[in-house]
Structures are given as structure tokens and as C-alpha cells.
């Protein structure tokens, strides 16, 4: 996923009334959305195939379950990914390796997805990931003033040393009590290192935790997008 950085922030201040406003937004063109992950950690390889949703559409995104998915590398090895082999309801649209498979740092990978007679490909190299040196936590200033009913007002702060001389993109995933969490289901937490110095000091998490929650963060070098 190269150079993918997109945030929407809407702030509405209301004095004494609360009136729903329907924005006049054009229908989003129907597009395929493909997210793939190859890592050097067992059990972390997957490809997710969906279609984008309209701005006001609620519920899960449209999942594609009949794609043909393969990943190959520059050594000649290739493997087929199969759709949701365990039949899990929350894994619809996810494809995983048909057999044990892990990536090798330094190799170049090509992801090929065939959907509806159209072929989509992306090629990139698997880089080593900058390690998170430490994680701290603190109350979020604004949420602490008016703690939400779910009690989640604590944010994480991440510290790391960023290698200079290369352009890197990082994909972060946040877990609460061993469950992957988002602010919204379609969120992808990626940032580019452009303009960042060697030290990453206290980057705040976009999700929140309650006292007593177990928090975990994973970081990947994110470079492949279709």
C-alpha cells in the first residue's frame, strides 16, 4: 500500500439544537478494493477483496467470495490463496494461503487477483519493519473531560527509531483484549515517513482503551496496493 494516506475530519458545533443534516454527496463509483499482506510471521498472510460502499451505507462492506488469488515471488515460488476455509462469519472476503506460507525479507512479491474476468496485479518488495521501541499510555485530554459511557478514554503513545534514507509506509493494527479494533470498520491506519526525523516520539493511537484493558499494537511495512 504505497502512499495511501486519507483522513476525513468533520467537526460540528451546535449551540442549542440538534438537527440531522444530509450532505448532498454524489454516489461513489463502484470499485474493487483489494488489501494484501505478506509478512515473515506465520499466520499473518491474507488478501481481502471487497467493493467500496456509498458514504451513507451502513453495515459491512460488500465482500467478494469468488475471486482467484495467487501470490508469487522472484524466486519462482507461488501459492494459491483460498477463501475463508474455516467458514468464519467475520472472515467473509478474506483469502488465506492454501498451505503454510511466510514471506522472506528481501524478496519481491506479486499479488494477482482475478475477479469477474478482470485481472489485478501489484508487485513490491518485502522490507524489514522498524521495531516499536516502547509504548506508553495517557488519558486523552478531551475524552477525559467527558468520559464516554464505554469508559474508553486512554490513548497509546508509540516510540520508535525511523531509518533515514528510505521511503517507508507503515500499517498499524490495534488490539483491545486480543480483538482487532477500528474507529470505523473501513479504517486503515497508515502513515508515510516523509518529513519524519529519526525519532518517532509519542505518536498517539487513533483508538482508545478503558482502564484494565489489554492493549497490543503491531506494525508492518506497508507497500503493496491494488
Image (cartoon, helix red, strand yellow):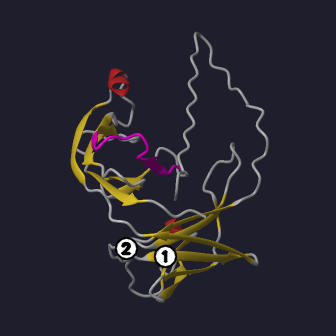
Q: Which residue lies under the disc numbered 2?
A: 106
Pick out the residue farthest to the front.
165
Q: Which mark is residue 1?
A: none
Residue 111: give x, y in percent of width and height: 55, 75
Residue 104 lies left or right of residue 6; in this view the side is left
Question: Callout 1: 10 Å neighbours few (<14), some, many (20+)?
Answer: many
- For the point 44% across and 47% down, which residue is it? 191
Does dot 2 land on a helix, a strand or a loop?
Answer: loop
Residue 41: give x, y in percent of width and height: 32, 73
**The magenta segment:** 187-200
Q: Considering the image in quadrants, where does the C terminus appear?
A: bottom right
Along the viewing direction, whichever of 93 and 201 lies nearer the viewer: 201
Does dot 1 land on a helix, a strand or a loop?
Answer: strand
Question: Callout 2: 10 Å neighbours few (<14), some, many (20+)?
Answer: few
**Residue 122 lies in the magenta stretch:** no
* Total number of numbered discs in the rendering: 2
Residue 206 lies left or right of residue 158; in this view the side is right
Dividing the picture into quadrants, the one containing residue 48 is: bottom right
- For the point 38% across and 60% down, which residue is it? 220
- For the point 53% across and 51% down, which residue is it? 3
Q: Distance between the residues labelled 1 and 2?
A: 10 Å
Along the viewing direction, whichever of 55 and 179 lies nearer the viewer: 55
Task: Note whether 75 is above or below 18 in the view shown.
Answer: below
Dividing the picture into quadrants, the one containing residue 144 is: top left
Of the two numbered discs 1 and 2 in the rendering, the one whose residue sits closer to the viewer: 2
Instruction: Assess whether mark 2 and mark 1 are in contact (beta carbons under 8 angstroms).
Output: no
Q: Which mark is residue 109?
A: 1
Along the viewing direction, whichever of 111 and 139 lies nearer the viewer: 111
Task: Note whether 215 is above or below 22 in the view shown.
Answer: below
Task: Note whether 73 is above or below 35 in the view shown.
Answer: below
Amino acid at each position: 500500500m504505497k502512499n495511501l494516506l486519507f483522513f476525513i475530519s468533520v467537526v460540528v458545533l451546535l449551540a442549542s439544537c440538534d438537527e440531522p443534516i444530509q450532505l448532498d454527496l454524489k454516489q461513489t463509483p463502484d470499485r474493487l478494493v483489494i488489501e494484501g499482506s505478506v509478512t515473515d510471521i506465520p499466520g499473518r498472510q491474507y488478501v481481502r477483496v471487497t467493493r467500496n460502499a456509498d458514504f451513507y451505507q451502513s453495515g459491512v462492506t460488500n465482500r467478494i467470495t469468488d475471486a482467484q488469488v495467487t501470490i508469487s515471488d522472484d524466486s519462482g515460488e507461488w501459492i494459491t490463496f483460498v477463501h475463508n476455509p474455516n467458514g468464519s462469519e467475520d472472515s467473509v472476503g478474506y483469502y488465506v494461503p492454501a498451505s503454510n506460507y511466510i514471506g522472506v525479507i528481501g524478496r519481491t512479491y506479486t499479488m494477482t487477483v482475478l475477479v469477474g474476468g478482470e485481472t489485478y496485479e501489484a508487485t513490491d518488495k518485502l522490507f524489514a519493519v522498524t521495531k516499536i521501541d516502547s509504548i506508553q499510555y495517557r488519558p486523552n485530554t478531551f475524552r477525559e473531560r467527558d468520559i464516554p459511557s464505554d469508559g474508553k478514554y486512554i490513548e497509546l503513545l508509540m516510540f520508535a527509531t525511523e531509518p533515514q534514507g528510505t521511503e517507508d509506509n507503515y500499517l498499524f493494527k490495534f488490539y483491545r483484549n486480543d480483538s482487532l479494533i477500528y474507529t470505523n470498520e473501513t479504517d486503515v491506519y497508515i502513515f508515510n515517513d516523509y518529513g519524519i526525523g529519526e525519532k518517532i516520539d509519542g505518536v498517539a493511537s487513533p483508538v482508545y482503551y478503558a482502564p484494565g484493558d489489554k492493549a497490543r499494537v503491531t506494525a508492518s511495512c506497508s507497500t503493496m496496493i491494488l
